Image: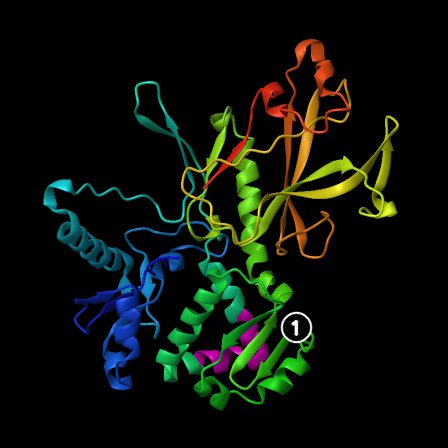
Amino acid sequence: MSEKTPTTLLLDKNKKFVSFGYAAENDYSSMTEEKRKEHYYFRRFKMTLYDKDGKLKLSRNTILKDLRDKEMPAIEGFARSIEYLKDEFVKKFGERNLKLSILPLNENVTWEVRDDGKIQEVNRAQDGDWSGIYVDEEFKRMLEDIVSKPIIEAFCMKYTGDYIALFRFFEKKKRQTQAGKIVRVHVPPTLLEIADNIVKCIADHGLNDEIELKRDKLQIKVRKFEEFFNKVLDEIVVKVEEMLVSDTVEGTKVIIMVGGFSEFKYTYGVDTYTRFIKDKHPESRKKLINGIEYCADKFDIVVNKGKLVHCNEEINKTYSPIYEDQTSVKFGVFASNAIEPQYNDDEGCKEMFLCRTQLGAPEGKLRQSLSSEQPRSLLKAWTKRPMSLWT
């Protein structure tokens, strides 16, 4: 898994470019305290351009603040960064292949391929706080709640290298598939030194059942760790729902996912009814429909947690309607932190959204071949808008 380069910029005391990305983090971490005071260090500065409501606040007068609250016009910071990226591109691909296209940061854009082969923008979503950086902020907020915000600020100023290392370690954990029940995050010794009794602080905040400090490891229960993602994921779901009901995206058949959240960190599936099998399915799940026993709320897996899905790989699933005169169908799409969830109300399962589609059978009825004797048939053949999942 390749890691995305952070938008971290390091400048000298004269605001001359020093380094960018992980190189900037490493260079700043290795400096003496006196050297750090002389330099400008902007960590993941692009997200500081958004207000608390997730709206872009960039203008010619926008000011960036570095780690020590030193100020510089945002336009200068972007100029240094773009110049560096341009130079790196030219080194790798050559001058004649250079075509630089700049889009507003953190925006969702929907494009349409026209009949003449050209691409046209048809929908631009507003900016919002659904970047992975906001997951880091939730983790940071938890630390501040435990040991206090002044302690975390002092840790950042006095032991900057360790502060950067802590969040870089968290970044790796954030991008990993968590197969166990506990996520272990290494805590630098310097934070343990300046913070008061962390074990007592955890207990005082009533977090003993969710967090435990063992030596230099903060052991976080998976359910607590996943709470860091909840706000961001909820924002993504709302935004996708808003986009899908827009007239400008009518007829969309494929959704392409990009960025860190496009990796399968959960098992995804749909809510289905399947034939009831005695001694396999619990009696409480049994439901009688048209004289046939079904097992309700079965989690039918589409993609397993941790599964590698290649670029442009299409995943198709086929289902049969239950009723012969059925003219529409709906699926609840669920995500689970388990590898093999059984039911949609299992612990760790969460409904992401509801998918509805119309059936296009002749005269509003399904063919006789889609009878109860045929548990799986090609529903896709009857839908007007077949759906596929791409990554």
Tell me if residue 71 can be seen.
Answer: no
- 364 relative to 148 in the view: left or right: right
* Residue farthest to the left, as pictured: 95
Nearer-the-camera pick, 222 or 7: 222
**Residue 192 lies within the magenta run:** no
Q: Quadrant of the N terminus?
A: bottom left
* Residue farthest to the top, as pictured: 363
Magenta stretch secondary structure, dominant: helix
Q: Residue at x 32, y 43 (%)?
A: 103
Residue 379, above or below 362? below
**Residue 142 lies within the magenta run:** yes
Q: Quadrant of residue 25?
A: bottom left
Nearer-the-camera pick, 64 or 389: 389
Question: Magenta segment, which residues?
Answer: 141-153
Q: Position of residue 194 (x, y in %)?
A: 48, 89
Q: Residue at x 71, y 57 (%)?
A: 347
Label 1 secondary element:
loop
Q: Position of residue 66 (x, y in %)?
A: 32, 69
Number of numbered discs: 1
Q: Quadrant of the C terminus?
A: top left
Amino acid tagged 1: Glu
Residue assigned mark 1: 210
Nearer-the-camera pick, 322 or 350: 322
Q: Position of residue 293 (x, y in %)?
A: 85, 34
Q: Position of residue 178 (x, y in %)?
A: 55, 63
Nearer-the-camera pick, 74 or 214: 214
